[in-house]
Image (cartoon, helix red, strand yellow):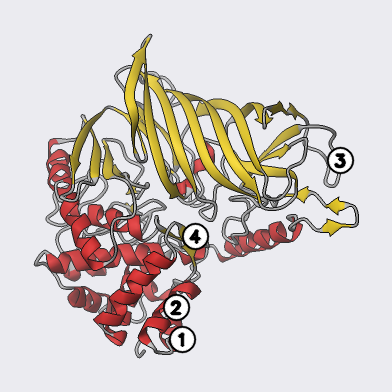
Amino acid sequence: MLMNGRASAVASGHGDSAEGGPSTLPLGRRVHRLRPSGGIARHAGHLQCADPSAEEIGVRVRRQVSGALAALLVGMGAVVLSAGATAAQEGPRGPRFTAGAPGAGDAYFPFAGNGGYDVQHYDLDITYTPPAPAPAPLVGRLSGVATIDLVATQDLDRFNLDLRGLEVEAISVNRKRATEVAPPAPGAEVEGAAYWHVQDDAARSWELTIQPRPKIKKGQTARVVVTYGGDTTRPTDIEGVLYGWVTMRDGAMVVSEPEGSMTWYPVSDHQTDKATYGFEITVPEGKVAVANGLPARDPVTEDGWTTWFWDAPDLQASYLTTASVGDYELRFSETDGGLPIIDAVDDNLTMANAATTEASLALQAEMIAFLEDAFVPYPFNSAGAIVDDDTVGYALETQTRSVYSRVASEGTVVHEIAHQWFGNAVSPERWQDIWLNEGWATYAEWLWSEDSGRDSAQALFESILDIPADDEFWDLAIADPGPFGLFLGGIYDRGAATLHALRVKIGDEAFFAASQEWLERYDDSTATTEDFEEVFEEFSGQDLGAFFDVWLRTPSKPTSW
């Protein structure tokens, strides 16, 4: 993810922000959500920002992290883990059914995701009405039916889904309807098939609890159907940055990193529970709805409404789903190898932003081929972009079809395409591992810059090392940045510098062989920083513990490694 004003980035070429602006090579995308001062913006998704050259690296955005709140969140994570049910145990009379945990166990976002089951597939049938023209309130209306196929991973008495800001109208499990009840007291028994919904904004806990009857045994499949809806607004993440289903006057930008998908459908909202998706999105006639994957069939228009059908058969993390709505023109092309590329470009881009966007998107096939040559074949069934004339302040690598605010610049496009491998195919098992997403995507920018005849990867690495040792840039230990540090500049630039230093230390042959193994071993899955270290030690034959400690875990400038 690259953000406007959330991080700093080194790039070859001139900068261009998410707001647009000319750029020779928009290489700034070093922080998911940058809020760069001068150069790069990153955000949970991807910041779009100016793309500073090596000489411009001195201008950076810094964000202060609230240690007390971060500690509180980590503590909350411990509470969830201890309170959450463990796997069912066999008793003398058979299986013991317990509640699935109300979180996936991520210390940064303790109530994101859920335990006790593994989602296989989501079918999302959504109808959306954008806001009326100004001066009407900037509020849309969404109604949906989510059909969720899951497999129990323990003997389940009850389980949770994440749903924020919307109301549940009906729920059934395996065709048996559940009754809405008031949230019970802890430990209280609830009779029959039931559900209850607790939304606690202060605790960042939005839990929909479902009690199926009969109970679900470990290994059994279940189909859960949730009918829901409500007003859509402009939700924000833990840092106050727009994410999720972001209502726009002419539609919606849907960008959900790190845990914003719950703002538009009931979900196990953590990347450790990847699933496949199908979408039916009904919008007023004249609007275009764009999701992940490929069109499942031609759109159907009836009585002033058009339904768009999309099929995403590749496993994907929930934060990478999109269903953006706007005044888009769909453009179809393909790579030399036949990979479909579908771009949705807003009709209302400024002339300058439209020109930059067209030039950048024209390079997508070449970028994909370049990254395939460096690493492994492209991992999904399609590629492309959604470029909206509105802005959330960043770009995000939504799977197969990244979302860009106002303009898609060259550096940002190669950054987001690189994420299809690094972040999407192989996702961070914990949010503290986000440098594995952003460091790699930024390093891909460096490699592309060098291949394009601009600054070399070595020159860009040296520009990072030129940052003074007393600069706040070096204060971040990127292997555990805290929940408020996910999109700081160091995640992007120090992450990329770590990779380049590693490449120099172990040599090109071991570096690229290990990179390919990383992508193959953890494809369609998640992995940690420790997993990454293990792969590179295996392929280099070296003990790299001290190297990774210096670059990833020490909050100071590396001087020897």
Disc 4 versus disc 3: nearer the observer = 3
Residue 507 in sight in this render: yes
Which label belongs to residue 533? Answer: 2
Residue 221 spot, x, y in % from top left: 64, 42
Instruction: Between residue 422 and residue 197, name the one nearer to us.
Output: 422
The answer to which of marks 2 and 3 sits earlier in the sequence is 3
Residue 436 spot, x, y in % from top left: 40, 66
Check disc 4 and give the amino acid type.
Phe
Q: Which residue is mark 1?
A: 545
Q: Which residue is mark 3?
A: 189
**Which residue is located at x 63 percent, y 59 percent?**
105
The quadrant of the image that shows the N terminus is bottom left
The answer to which of marks 4 and 3 sits earlier in the sequence is 3
The answer to which of marks 2 and 4 sits earlier in the sequence is 4
Check disc 2 and give the amino acid type.
Glu
1 and 3 marks in contact (CB < 8 Å): no
The answer to which of marks 1 and 3 sits earlier in the sequence is 3
CA distance separating discs 4 and 1: 26 Å
**Which residue is located at x 29 percent, y 63 percent?**
376
In the picture, residue 134 is in which quadrant? top left
